[in-house]
């Protein structure tokens, strides 16, 4: 308690400005993404849509992960995380762009989802049986409902937080509890269905009831990693002196480790049931992914998405050393990309992976847009919720051993 | 006969009394500051007694991190390999049974049990290590003052402190600003 005693009513964080250099870099990245999208569409239309879905799902998940993290802080009435909550709220600022991205995705849907081909479905009794769910109208209707819900909840939950910066109204925090509980329930269902619609239905004959949880595990793991990177960056730049400390980063590091284990647990749960039951319509998923280049990627996932981050995050010092922790976060974020690649690409390619400038370009494009919205949000609002009633708890936060 | 059993139980649960000096402080903050100074003055075996956990007290008193995590890690690895070996030996070496056409040594099938033995060994040995490091089941810490579980804060220097000298310790406590100092056998 005696180390850095800041009283909640004296808090006055410095203003975070988006530097011109940052703006230029983000714009160039987004522009490169757009260019490669256009070039890709005119040269290799199908692969471009695969790459689009991959990068789109990646960054949509980060944005939703930010809102989800914010919501669980409200649900649990967490005090320790108040000063880092703005970082997760900032990630939600990407969601309006993600909604536009969903509209774009609908245009590419025919190159991605074979069940949209009515003639093909008629000839296939299994797909015909799934037609009540897997059809164009219902697919678009679901997307519309999901995005309305996500945007609405994000706007209300995050809007109350930024409004509180101005008014200091403590009731806003109380109201957010109920809203957040509702969001967590809505999110659990909608994100599961969304992952089924956009990723699992790429191979429409295959099914796995745990797929939504698997997608969520990746979402949360990578969102925490991104939050840690933002927190470390803001600390390094000195915008949050005494407000966000290694104590907060340490606890985020624990979150990252916990959900690294969670991902492995869920991934294995999905694998072992399919492996044991050994039914051809289920094993086809792992059959593809255990041959050729995909086998190497499957092994890489086990090693670099679970074993390496798990061991690297085990000691206490690992979660309190910025350089080390940042390296693990970057690894986790790269592996999240590889994971989605591994979910999407084997459905279209034979035994061999293909990766080129279209994938890199689209990723850069989304990255630029995502950073622009996230960092722009932090520049527009105060870098921490300065009038949150639980702010003092976060300022005094201390991880004891 | 019964008396000797009671004696044995008593010996197991109780530790011998220790001589020492107690200094009392008014609040947690003063106590942390005093503990920091005491550690910096070279005291090794002293302790702080407070009615609630005080942030920063571990660092102030110089409490080292618990060695339990290392025990957990090593025993977890032991449990992991023991569980895996047990299944390998029973189902592939000693009594091979073909199940569902899978190989005798089927790693995926063995993971759940391997996971469980890892947790089992790790958790049980953590508890055992906790008992050992805390010298449990001895549960009678010296009762320095009944109010220490209620409203008072104290630093306690037992006579096991290297170079212990009651008068010197008392003088130092006074220098630290202790409001009340007492010595005796606790």
Image: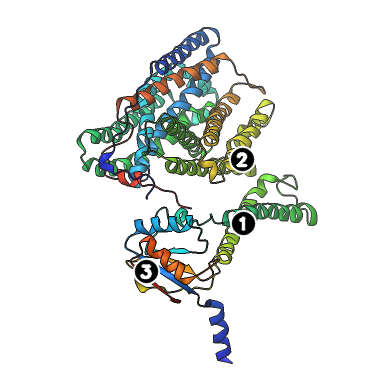
The image shows residue A140, relative to residue B172, as above or below, that is above
Q: State the CA–CA distance, disc 1 to disc 3.
A: 33 Å
Residue mark closest to the camera, 2 vs 1: 1
Of badges 1 and 3, the one in the foreground is: 3
In the image shown, does A300 or B185 lie closer to the viewer?
B185
Mark 2: few/some/many CA within 10 Å (<14, 14-19, 20+): some
- Real-space Cα separation, disc 2 to disc 1, in angstroms: 20 Å
Residue lying at 55% horizontally and 7% vertically, measured from the top left: A43
Residue situated in front as seen by the camera: A156 or B123: B123
- Please say whether residue A133 is visible from this viewpoint: no
Tell me residue A216's x, y (percent). 47, 37
Dots 2, 3 in contact, CB < 8 A? no
At a point 20% along the width and 35% down the height, the residue shown is A167
Identify the disc placed on residue B148. Answer: 3
Q: Which residue is mark 2?
A: A307
Image quarter of residue A162:
top left
Please name the residue that numbered disc 1 is placed on: B71
């Amino acid at each position: 308690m005696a180390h850095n005693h800041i009283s909640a009513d004296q808090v006055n964080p410095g203003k975070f400005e988006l530097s011109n250099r940052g703006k230029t870099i983000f714009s160039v990245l987004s522009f490169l993404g757009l260019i490669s999208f256009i070039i890709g569409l005119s040269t290799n239309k199908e692969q471009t849509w695969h790459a689009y879905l991959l990068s789109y799902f990646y960054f949509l998940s980060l944005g939703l992960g930010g809102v989800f993290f914010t919501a669980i802080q409200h649900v649990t009435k967490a005090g320790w995380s108040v000063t880092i909550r703005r970082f997760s709220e900032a990630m939600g600022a990407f969601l309006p762009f993600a909604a536009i991205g969903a509209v774009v995705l609908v245009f590419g849907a025919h190159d991605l989802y074979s069940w949209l081909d009515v003639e093909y479905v008629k000839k296939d009794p299994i797909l015909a049986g799934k037609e009540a769910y897997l059809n164009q109208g219902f697919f678009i209707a679901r997307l519309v409902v999901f995005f309305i819900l996500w945007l609405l909840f994000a706007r209300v939950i995050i809007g109350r937080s930024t409004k509180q910066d101005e008014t200091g109204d403590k009731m806003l925090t109380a109201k957010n509890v109920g809203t957040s509980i509702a969001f967590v329930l809505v999110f659990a269902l909608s994100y599961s269905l969304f992952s089924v619609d956009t990723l699992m239905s790429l191979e429409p004959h295959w099914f796995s009831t745990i797929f939504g949880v698997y997608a969520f595990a990746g979402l949360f793991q990578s969102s925490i990693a991104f939050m840690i990177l933002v927190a470390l960056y803001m600390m390094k730049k000195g915008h949050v002196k005494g407000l966000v400390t290694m104590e907060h980063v340490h606890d985020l590091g624990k979150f990252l480790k916990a959900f690294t284990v969670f991902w492995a647990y869920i991934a294995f749960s999905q694998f072992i049931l399919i492996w044991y039951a050994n039914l051809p319509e289920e094993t086809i998923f792992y059959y593809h992914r255990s041959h050729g280049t995909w086998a190497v990627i499957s092994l890489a996932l086990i090693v670099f998405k679970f074993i390496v981050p798990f061991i690297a995050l085990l000691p206490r010092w690992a979660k309190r050393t910025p350089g080390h922790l940042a390296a693990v976060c970057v690894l986790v974020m790269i592996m999240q990309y590889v994971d989605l690649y591994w979910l999407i690409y084997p459905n279209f390619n034979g035994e061999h992976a293909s990766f080129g400038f279209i994938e890199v370009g689209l990723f850069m494009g989304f990255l630029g847009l995502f950073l622009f919205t996230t960092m722009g949000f932090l520049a527009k609002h105060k870098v921490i919720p300065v009038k949150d009633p639980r702010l003092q708890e976060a300022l005094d936060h201390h991880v004891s051993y | 006969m019964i008396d000797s059993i009671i004696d044995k139980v008593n010996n197991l649960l109780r530790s011998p009394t220790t001589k020492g000096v107690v200094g009392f402080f008014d609040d947690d903050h003063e106590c942390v500051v005093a503990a920091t100074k005491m550690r910096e003055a070279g005291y090794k075996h002293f302790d702080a007694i407070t009615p609630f956990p005080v942030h920063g007290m571990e660092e102030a008193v110089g409490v080292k991190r618990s060695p339990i995590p290392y025990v957990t890690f090593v025993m977890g690895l032991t449990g992991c390999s023991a569980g895996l070996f047990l299944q390998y030996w029973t189902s592939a070496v000693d009594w091979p049974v073909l199940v569902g056409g899978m190989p005798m040594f089927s790693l995926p099938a063995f993971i759940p049990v391997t996971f469980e033995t890892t947790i089992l060994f790790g958790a049980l040995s953590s508890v055992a290590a906790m008992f050992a490091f805390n010298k449990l089941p001895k549960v009678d810490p010296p009762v320095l003052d009944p109010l220490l579980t209620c409203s008072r804060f104290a630093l306690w220097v037992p006579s096991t402190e290297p170079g212990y000298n009651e008068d010197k310790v008392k003088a130092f406590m006074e220098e630290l600003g202790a409001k009340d100092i007492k010595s005796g056998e606790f």
